[in-house]
Amino acid sequence: MFKKIIKGSRKHSKSDPTDASSRPPRSGNTGSDLNPHLVVNHATRPGQGKPPSTNSSSPMVPPPMSAVEPLPLLRDTPVSERQNLFMRKLQICCFLFDFTDVLKSAREKEIKRQTLLELVDYIQSGSGKITEICQEEMIKMVGINIFRSLPPASHENTGQGASDPEEEEPYLDPTWPHLQIVYELLLRYVVSSDTDTKVAKKYIDHSFILKLLDLFDSEDPREREFLKTILHRIYGKFMVHRPFIRKAINNIFYRFIYETERHSGTGELLEILGSIINGFALPMKEEHKLFLVRALIPLHKPKPIAMYHQQLSYCIIQFVEKDYKLADTVIRGLLKYWPLTNCQKEVLFLGELEEVLEATQSAEFQRCMVPLFRQIARCLNSLHFQVAERALFLWNNEHIVNLIALNRQVILPIIFEALERNIHGHWNQAVHGLTMNVRKMFMEMDADLFDECQREFAEKEARAQEVEEQREMTWKKLADVAAERGDNMVTV
């Protein structure tokens, strides 16, 4: 049967030649330069080079195909010949086409698509155990299809400065109809109970994982979603690769933070890390704490944080919930990267801060409360009403109010002036009303302390007024002296 297939393929290659650009890339062990009747033993087993027995059913790598032609269905083929047919079908799937032109090679594209769908169904159904050589060739085929140079980002194409990623239309890869099925095939192979990790790790190795991670920079959200699922499954199944995957993701973040400030897949990578962090054992390893300090907290620095802040915030909260002693480190990290002029970013920070404080214990809160409430006081007086409003919403959280109440002797003197200035001068009515509520809460919490803070504030205002009057008097005296001398002095 196998010889018939080979003869059939030779006939097709003579009758229907295709352009050389659509042929599958040659690999070192395709057998293209070898006698077609010679068996290549990929597994390097003892007895390599011996001619196979005539009744052996072990598959061998067939000669490369020169054209895309339909092959018999796997389910209609005898079990003894399925592995060889499987490899022939893999060769069809190695052909690459130009998808920018819909009409070009339409027949060949459809044959490849149907073949990919059949391979996915074959893997998913578990119809037969795939031999090691078939697994190797299948991973090679997947690599030929998905590992490619990504098109330049839209701002790179136009030569203009990088625009806001949130405002850009998502890029949709024209090759996706085939890429999606290739990704589905890889996913089914990874999650299959028939896949032996001891064998699969030879082909899904560090090089394969690095190339997979490079694809997370794809601008097509559909591709990133598939990559996220596949990498998460690889992390779960191949325990030997876990430290390497974490380190490789770290390196992507470092480059994003300190060099490019642009990466399409940051959110998806953080989603994977959210699940990974959730599974960290206690007590937490020093390696994981360093990852928090060196990678996750600095991710608050880049401008496009809005694109991935939800996933980043989830990862940060996971750390604090796992080890409450990390709350002080996280809060001080937020204060270090607190935005000065970006109000939308401030709102995000305040939302994350509330979640962190909700998981913070009293001892850790006391370590950072002074610099924390100095920053909150600045937010209370922000002219951007959303920032001031979001800061005041912190007093709606019962756990945070309890922490404040326990440490009111320190906190109220820090923020009292900000509250008074809002009441007497903030332009937004909603902010004014919320400030009144917070002020009333402190008054009911500790009336004596409130009166003391009010007295100190009045004295401070009086001193400031006195200094201002003294300054005006000094300028008036200078103006009078100048006028007496007849100088032409312009007073402002």
Image: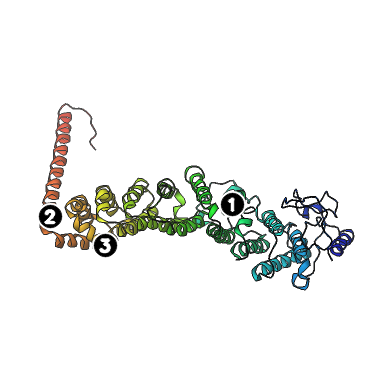
Q: Residue at x 60, y 61 (%)?
A: 190
Q: Secondary structure at mark 3?
A: helix
Foreground residue, 302 or 82?
82
* Residue 70 on image: x %, y %: 80, 66
Q: Dot 3 corresponds to which residue?
A: 399
Name the amino acid type tagged 2: Leu
Tell me: 235 left or right of 453: right
Return the disc, 1 or 2, that comes first in the chain's sequence: 1
> Which is in the foreground here, disc 3 or disc 1?
1
Q: Are marks 3 and 1 in contact (CB under 8 Å)?
A: no
Q: Residue furthest front?
A: 46
Q: Find numbered disc 1 in the image and state the secondary structure of the residue it sits on.
A: helix
Which quadrant does the C terminus fall into? top left
Question: Disc 1 marks which residue?
Answer: 209
Q: Earlier in the sequence, mark 2 or mark 3?
A: 3
**Could you tell which of marks 3 and 1 lies nearer the N-terminus?**
1
Q: Total label count?
A: 3
Left or right of residue 269: residue 316: left
Identify the image's colour scheme: rainbow, by chain, secondary structure or one colour: rainbow
**Residue 27 x, y percent position in the rendering:** 74, 50
